[in-house]
Image (cartoon, rainbow, N blue to C red):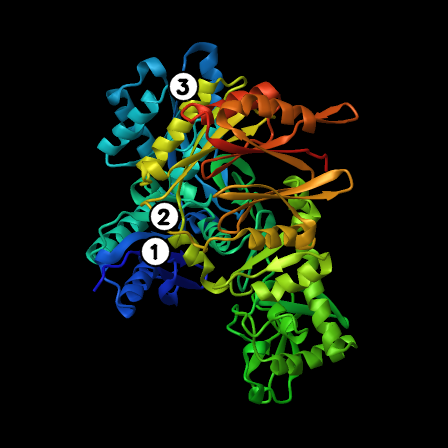
Amino acid sequence: MEKRSIRVGIDVGGTHTKAVALDNATHEIVGESIVMTSHDDPMGVAAGVIECFEKCLTQNGIDPDDVVFIAHSTTQATNALLEGDVAKVGIIGMGAGGLEAMLAKRQTNIPAIDLGTGRFIETCHTYMKVKDVNKESLGKAIDELKAQGATVIAGSKAFGVDDLKEELLVREAAQEKGMLASVASDISKLYGLTRRTRTAAINGSILPKMMNTAESTESSVRKAGIKVPLMIMRGDGGVMDITEMKKRPVLTMLSGPAASVMGALMYLRASNGIYFEVGGTSTNIGVIKNGRPAVEYSIVGGHRTYINSLDVRVLGVAGGSRVRAANGHLVDVGPRSAHIGGLKYAVYTPTGEIEEPELEFFSPKPGDPEDYVRIKLKSGKRVTITNSCAANVLGLVKETDYSYGNVESARLCMKPLADYMGVSVEECARQILDKAYEKIKPVIEEFAEKYRIEKDQITLVGVGGGAAALLPYTAKEMQLNYSIPKYAEVISSIGVALAMVRDVGERVIPNPTTEDIRQLKKEAATLAVKNGAVPDTIEVQIEIDPQTSKITAIALGSTEVQTTDLQLKCGEEEARGLAADSMHAKPEEVETLIKNDIFYVFGRTVGEKQQVRLVDHRGFIKVQNSDAVARLCKAGEWEEAVAELWNAQLGYKTDMVMTPDFFLCIGGKVLDFSNTLSLEQLQTIMRSEFLEADENEPIILIAAKTEVF
């Protein structure tokens, strides 16, 4: 029998843990398994992860030797911080003496960190002059902090970005004392002593919890005969080796939503959009911009950190959100969901059970309002009305959708509520979804403005079992396109299975040179290799924050060389149709501007503007702009071509200079050079991409005018 190569992805959700096995060559699903998430097990969610992956292998006849990649998402970092299941952290601040010491001592003395839930990370602190830092003095400092109740040590040095020696020495000294340690330089190389120290303390606070889980899971994977490294989903959409996770567990915050969006991107040919991960209780909403999820620094309990994770808004409204009503009117939908109290959705109840439905009001939990709705049946059984029920009644859910149920059951149960409100069943359902929409619309508008996504470029992308309960109605009300990908209910597990290794290098460099950029890219690539990426697969993207002069190098790479693509090759006419759809135009209105073996560039003239779409050979729209120009040239001609396009696309608005966004297609890469402040800065940063390029290699340049929103 021919040996297979299998990728396994496991997603830990609030209710279920799901595993998916994919054929590495075709990316077809060859196995699935699902278990209840093991929140109450002594091993925590790790028990469910272990059970799920073992079940996936054994039930689908997968040989452990065939597994070339295994990864899982985790809720543990997020839950530990939400629930206050954290360790007390002893902080060792380090810096110079004299006047400088007063500032550094104050900035590293982080008080108890409010987690925003009534719980805190407790801290204690000591300060050492750098000249006094050695193994012996650190040992004494650690003993003092331990005597104050610290079980984890965090090390943070003023200007530690420039010299990591003392921070690394803190970790060595702590480990010799049998204690876990978190050092600021493991997480970020950015200046900002207070934020670096706080980030190290938050990371340290969850180390004991995460280490137990990591070691249990890793041990079980090894016992199952799997030899490849166990990877963990990061909150920014990549994966990291479990050995690195043991140093930086805080980077796994929001790894569940990250898994969802990465899975959706595998199956959707979308460049710009707002994605929804819709469960039963809550919905995570985030942004896809130019084919990548938007990433920001996390805020923990109102405090800014250097933890990279998806820019996500969490709403207490989802597929299973319950209805509230009072005084003959609908009050709200959510935040309590059907599973609180174990009530079944009306729409998933057999129609034969719906006899003499009667409206009741109740309080799901002590302290909750007493206006939540439930329906009592003749048998004494009680069910509840949800967004999923309303969407089914209005015919917005397709039979192929995971949210599809017994429409007649939903109608019969909704009738008592509609009568109470004095409206038809259909109007009652519309008002229910409208309450949910009122919460969702402002988030979409906020993201569109923040990330400068024009309305005609927005597609709503829905994943999770409850996606069809909210997306069709929202898209209809906002007149937007929407898409719910194939396998939406297990898309998170697919996202984990297909995730790339991701790591980041960051520096504040006011006037970066080409050598600065080259070194930063090298640092990011080295981190990715350390995390398990094959060097030849790594691509590094540069991002610039013009307000702070921060340069970010994002390295993405695969754990092994993949020889096939997720999608079949897309021909020119199919690609033209995809571009036309995104422009809301007919294919015959769209012109092919440039094409090669990897990319198509399509354009459409609207008034004085030219819409541009860059589509790759798999049919993924990589760049979309409403006012742009594109040029094909040789690598040796790039500087002159960039200068011409820059000057042509430079804009002015009152007293503001609007610098264009640039995109470079070289080889198979699409590189985004948005937000550069000047032509000189753009050329300095872009030059690093041409250091080893053949002068005759064809490249594509796209320059887009920017607007003020």
Q: Looking at the picture, does residue 178 appear above or below residue 423?
A: above
Image quadrant for the C terminus? top right
Residue 625 image-quadrant placement: top right
Kind of residue at badge 1: Ala
Q: Which of marks 3 and 1 is in front?
A: 1
Few, some or many C-alpha atoms within 10 Å of disc 1 (few <14, some 14-19, many ≥20)?
Answer: some
Kind of residue at badge 3: Asp
User: Would residue 630 be seen by someone viewing this image from the given angle?
Assistant: yes
x and y percentages locating residue 447 in the rendered image: 64, 45
x and y percentages locating residue 79 in the rendered image: 44, 51
Kindly identify the residue that appears in the image at 64 percent across and 24 percent down: 644
* Rendered image: mark on residue 232: 2
- How far, Cα to Cα, is label 2 from label 1? 22 Å
Query: On the picture, is 453 further left or further right than 228?
Result: right
Circle 3 is placed at which residue position?
162
Kindly identify the residue that appears in the image at 33 percent across and 39 percent down: 531
Nearer the observer, 215 or 134: 215
Q: Looking at the picture, does residue 250 appear above or below residue 403?
A: above
Query: On the picture, is 661 further left or further right than 262?
Result: right
Circle 1 is placed at which residue position?
25
- How far, Cα to Cα, is label 2 from label 3? 29 Å
Query: On the picture, is 491 further left or further right than 389?
Result: left
Image quadrant for the N terminus? bottom left
Query: Which tag, 2 or 1, sits closer to the chain's start?
Result: 1
